Amino acid sequence: MEFSIKNGNSEKQRTACVIVGVYETRKLSEAAAAIDHASDGYLVGIMRRGDMDGKIGTSLLLHNVPGTLCDRVLLVGLGRERDFNERAYRRVVAASIKPLETRGAMDVATFLAELPVKKRDIGWKVEQMIEVAQDAAYRFAHPLCKKADEPHGIEKLIINVPMRNDLRKCDNALRRGLAIAAGVQFTKDLGNLPGNICTPTYLAEQAVELGKQHNFSVEVLEKSDMEKLEMGSLLSVARGSRQPPKLIVMRYSGGAATRKPLALVGKGITFDSGGISIKPAADMDEMKYDMCGAASVLGTFKAVAQMGLPINLIGIIPTCENLPDGNASKPGDIVTSMSGQTIEILNTDAEGRLILCDALTYTESFNPEVVVDIATLTGACVIALGHHASGLFSNSEHLSKELQHAGEETCDRVWPMPMWDDYQESLKSNFADMANVGGRAAGSVTAACFLSRFTKKFDWAHLDIAGTAWKSGKEKGATGRPVPLLTRFLMNRSGLN
Ligand code: BES
Ligand code: MN
Ligand code: ZN
């Protein structure tokens, strides 16, 4: 989909379709009122007859509306005017894209960005419009999986804004929205690929390719390098797989050389069978998504590099498969992490923390200002927060607040969880410095507590995205979260507004 910004009148558009909103209780938006006026009350007539009641999420496609120059008018329900907030705006934008997706490719003028949204300016609305529209139009396609269909739906979306002093702001918002949408799409594509295509080697190749495209450096550490670094914990997870593990190291330098880098660390288990502590068969296919943390780091790099943010950023991705095998780790095995701390592997399915702990220790060598890790770490986090918010754990109050704020701004929300010392006790082992699991209670908290033992030297936050990285059921697919949150966090850090 292509996007442009204009300042036009709804009744004078010559496009294949014009999108305007109507509130519940028959109140027309300004753009709808202009069409209603030009058509001698055509829209009000439709609402009076009850064909469109303005309920949020509904829509009605009209042809040849009198007094207009476009082929179609799509009326979208906005709900109650006083409830029209950020989430309503996003919902309405998505509902305006969906009904057009089965039609032939067309150019469309939308007037939804003119609607007042509490707390948010035109820049926010333009950026969100692009992200939500691209999200709604996304289709997974790959020559070895599902082939791409004919071009369909909206080809060009013309976003109408009430101009005046807004032009520059909107241009910036357009560029940023496109960059974030591109990052989200990349993350979704990687997430949706099956484990037999998206292997650790494939992820590493994708990182190298991305670095070439966007001019940042990528280094891939091999098994032998990890052995030299004594990453006994990371290596223990890869033992059961024929696929070699990789440690991807990305460096984007957009800021002054004297500035300390920020670091993102993403869990890259390209398939999690559970290992010897094998998972039940039902829905195990979804464990191809266990590399979504890694994919979100790659997507965020894409967005950041495309925007050219003035920051220094490090991306670290430990990636391997977790499979059962004669050579796989067994419950009770004890390994030595790069930090020197020993770990008793009581459950081989708690593998994410085992690869992350060594990646986090390795991150120390970059002397980072802050480190954020992103991982589909625990089923328990899905039980705690469901699919709406990612779990947030941090050793820094300030960093925690920054991430919460970025989540609110992007509607890609996180919710803070405790990491009190009391929880650390459950990781006690009689045989090693710690166990890799702490029992069923507070599973997402004890997982974070495990990681906290490897992050003493920097400000750190952990995002558990087990509930937010993908959707199950009929709409099964990666969401691209938390790329919007991470990118916004980095934009805020870079001093951009
Ligand atoms: N990748 C899973 C977490 C997961 C499970 C995410 C289901 C989303 C849906 C992780 O590696 C895992 O298996 N965690 C275990 C930890 C347990 C053994 C302490 C879990 O959550 O059951
Ligand atoms: Mn697991
Ligand atoms: Zn896992």
Image (spheres, rainbow, N blue to C red):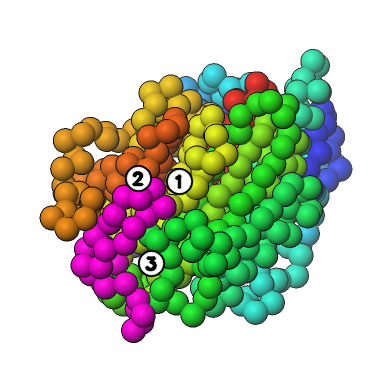
- Residue 281 locus on image (x, y percent): 31, 77
Neighbourhood count class around disc 1 (C-alpha, 10 Å): few under 14, some 14–19, many 20 upward: many
Q: Secondary structure at mark 2?
A: helix
Sequence-earlier tag: 1 or 3: 3
Query: The magenta stretch spans which residues?
Result: 324-348
**Residue at the spot of label 1:** 360
Identify the amino acid type marked 3: Ser
**Residue at the spot of label 3:** 236
Indicate whether 129 appears above or below 62.
above
* Corner quadrant of residue 66: top right
Q: Secondary structure at mark 1?
A: helix
Residue in the picture at 53% in, 67% down: 223
Looking at the picture, tell me which residue is in the foreground, 437 or 411. 437
Give the side of residue 314 with respect to residue 333, left or right: right
Residue in the picture at 38% in, 60% down: 233
Inter-mark Cα distance, 2 to 3: 17 Å
| Magenta segment, prevailing SS (helix, strand or loop) | loop
- Residue 94 locus on image (x, y percent): 58, 46
Indicate whether 322 appears above or below 42.
below
Sequence-earlier tag: 2 or 3: 3
